[in-house]
Amino acid sequence: MKNWLLLWVGLAITPFTGFAATPTNVVDIMNGVAVEDVSENEALQVDQAYDYKDSLQRDTPRGTLEGFTRAVYEQDYNRAAEYLDLRYLPDNMSRDKGAEYAKQLQAIIDRNIWIDIEQINDTPQGADGDQLPSFRDIFGRIKLPSDEIALFLQRVPSDSGSIWKISNATVAKVPRLYENLGYGPVAEWFISNLPEGRILKVNTWEWALILTYLIVAFCVIIPITWLCKLLILRTDYHLKTELASIVAGPLRFFLAVIVVRTWSSSGTISAAALEAMDTGFLTFVSIVWLGWSGMGIIQAGLKQRMINKGQKQGASLLRPLINFIRVIFVILAILIWLEHLGFNAGAIIAGMGIGGIAIALASKQSIENFIGTITLYSAAPIKVGNLCKFGSIRGTVEEIGLRCTQIRTLDRTLIHVPNAKLVEMEIENISEREKIRFKADIRLDYLMTDTEKLKGIIADIKEMLESHESVMKEPLRVTFKGFGLHGLQVNIFAYIGTKSFPKYQVVSEELHLGIMDIVTKHGSRIIPVAPVALNPGQ
């Protein structure tokens, strides 16, 4: 990007990147002021830098403009007046007001003209072939609604021969130009009441004016958005809280920035200040914030709709998906903003592609986790809310994120398992079972249990299971397994028709107590695997 220099920052000061277009003439006219087309044979002569002899570098047209630029940039308007030809001015103008004329001329140039200082001739003779007298050079044209004003430099006599100054014909037009193109009453008040100085090449009073615009804009926007928020909260819209938050937050900021840009573009601040604002940083931030929040309310709406339709897995997928879209949105917004500033977004993307290999290697684990996330959502071995066993971990799945899955254990602790590791684990999804197995192996005392008692116990237990409303009819088995080391072994097998483990525990308790009652009723007893000594009275 070429360094086109603003007149008042012409001393090797790089302009803001928003103005990356190459001027077609000495002057790029800003804010509706026309740009003059110049053909190649009319281009101004560019020579090697001249070895200046004059203490103020007024030997050449370029030296004069550079000196004037330096003086006004340093806000030394008395020295800047030395670059003005104050001879033969109209009767209503005075040489004593040279500093004021220099200041007004600087304001006119600041607000309306961009000048490529390198295109200004740097020889004592001035430019040739410009159809002007040899003692006069042009450095800008301003087209008014009904007129066109040319800004001239001219060679004037001096003690050492001749020097170049901004012509008295141009100086004579400064008051009239300032009335039409200079700063207005508001800006004049700020200029008069704030100390001189610059921050980031922009006058301090202009920063103060822009800040005032922003404060006034918020004073105007806040009551309007507050009223809109109040009206939204009084509606029956199910996402009214989220929508009201957007109106009172990012939308309010976005509207304030738009109002400030509108006031500033139509106000009386310099082209440099406008260019500082035209970087679009605040607009970029407000749009990104608004878009980010807008995606949040879309996520909330879609999540509620999916939950109402019973699509809990899809609802759990929304958060990482929306976060991914948000990241892409921010990256695209940054690239568009950089393109606006004059950078080549294509070259940036190409550079990212070259560096992407190194980034990919450095973020290998993150990529594996992301692929693991896709696997978890596509194969869906687990869902949010499922009770599962992951190796030695048993708990409820709370969230399946882009990097890891959150598991709430039975001890109510929260474990984060990387998705890349999770997809390689053996997962037992307890919540996906359609019924729960009931299994009991009892041992009956040899001495207290004969054949008739054993048959009665088996028949009664089977009848109890078949009559219970929660026990499934098939498969159901109560069998004499054989003669164990410590007792007669009876195997009981059935399924409880429920997915709820708490309900299973209640039914299991009823069945176990029923088995104990049946054994006791038949005059037998259940013995442990290892016999225990009984009291003599038993």
Image (spheres, helix red, strand yellow):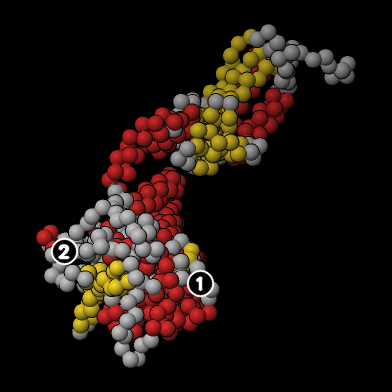
Q: What's the CA distance linking mark 2 and mark 1?
A: 40 Å
Q: Does residue 192 show up? A: yes
Q: Is residue 23 above or below residue 211?
A: above
Residue farthest to the right, as pictured: 536
Give the position of the C terminus as an image quadrant.
Answer: top right
Marking on residue 108? none
Q: Residues within 10 Å of mark 1 (few under 14, many from 20)?
A: few
The structure residue drawn at horizontal position 44% and vertical position 33%, both measured from the top left corner, is 363
Residue 273 position, x and y percent, is 40, 68
Q: Which residue is mark 1?
A: 196
Residue 169 position, x and y percent, is 26, 80
Judging from the image, what secondary structure is the residue with disc 2 in? loop
Q: Does residue 468 show up? A: no
Q: Which residue is mark 2?
A: 128
Label 1 is placed on what type of residue? Answer: Glu
The structure residue drawn at horizontal position 48% and vertical position 40%, both measured from the top left corner, is 400
Q: Along the line of sight, which residue is nearer the eye, 406 or 313?
A: 406
Q: In screen coordinates, is 261 left or right of 385?
A: left
